[in-house]
Image (cartoon, rainbow, N blue to C red):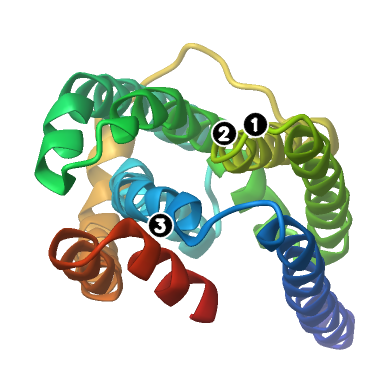
Amino acid sequence: MAESLTNKTVKGVSWSFIDSISSQGITFLVGLLLARLLTPEDYGLIGIIAIFIAVFNSIVDSGFSNALIRKVDATDKDYNTVFVSNMVVSVVLCFILYLTSPLVADFFERPQLDALLKVMSSVVIINAFAIIQRTLLVKRIDFKTQTKISLISSIASGVVGIGMALKGMGVWLLVGQQISRQLLNTLFLWIYAHWYPKLQFSIESFKELFGFGWKLLVSGLIDTVWKEIYRVVIGKCYSPATLGLYTRAH
């Protein structure tokens, strides 16, 4: 059993490495093509939106995925409880982001952000749909499947982005690229994880998992805010073009 687990772990690490390198490579190559069709300001606007998406994704997860991975005897009740919690929180946060998008646009003095944020807020809900499925694949040490899903999603969304670029859609192609990538990623995770939710919620399960997860939530939020605070400062004190150059360079 130990040898089998060792082999699965080695293979998992190898596939995880391949996933990281290939996804970064595809993103880089697509970025080179799109950079000739977009302005630094376009990337800057998406960089501002990425701040909110990153923070809200951390809140939606709330450390539940790590709590489920840690729990050896996690039951279907636990998974359904977390799924329901994630969906409720994601809908609330999406609604908040949708309503406050005009305020964000005013803060950064960029009217375009209003419409862009309203559309991109859907990513918070889309990502929430995939949390349990991704967690199950991690628990199975099945990084091979995750790599395949990531590659397909990256390539397909890259094609979508290039196609929208050729249509002259400007910054909206970046929105379409990101949403299509998350949609495809979520769809394939549902297909390959072979787990489908039920309308089930347990207070006891929620308390147990959140009791461990809230610490990771706080840690994750601090880490995310610290990483993204640079974008807030650059986006507010300088132009979106400057933020776009910073984002691409990073």
Q: Is residue 114 left or right of residue 61?
A: left
- The kind of secondary structure element at disc 3 is helix
**CA distance separating discs 1 and 2:** 6 Å
Query: Which residue, given by chain and number where applicable, does mark 2 sit on?
Result: 172
Image vertical order of residue 137 relative to residue 246, above or below:
above
- N-term mark: 3 or 1: 3
Q: Is residue 159 left or right of residue 95?
A: right
Residue at x-position 89% and y-position 56%: 148
Q: Is residue 103 left or right of residue 118?
A: left
Residue at x-position 73% and y-position 75%: 20
Query: Residue 2 lies in what quarter of the image?
Result: bottom right
The residue under label 3 is which amino acid type? Answer: Gly
Query: Which residue, given by chain and number where applicable, does mark 3 sit on?
Result: 44
Q: Nearer the viewer, residue 151 or 62?
A: 151
The residue under label 2 is which amino acid type? Answer: Trp
Q: Nearer the viewer, residue 37 or 187?
A: 37
- N-term mark: 2 or 3: 3
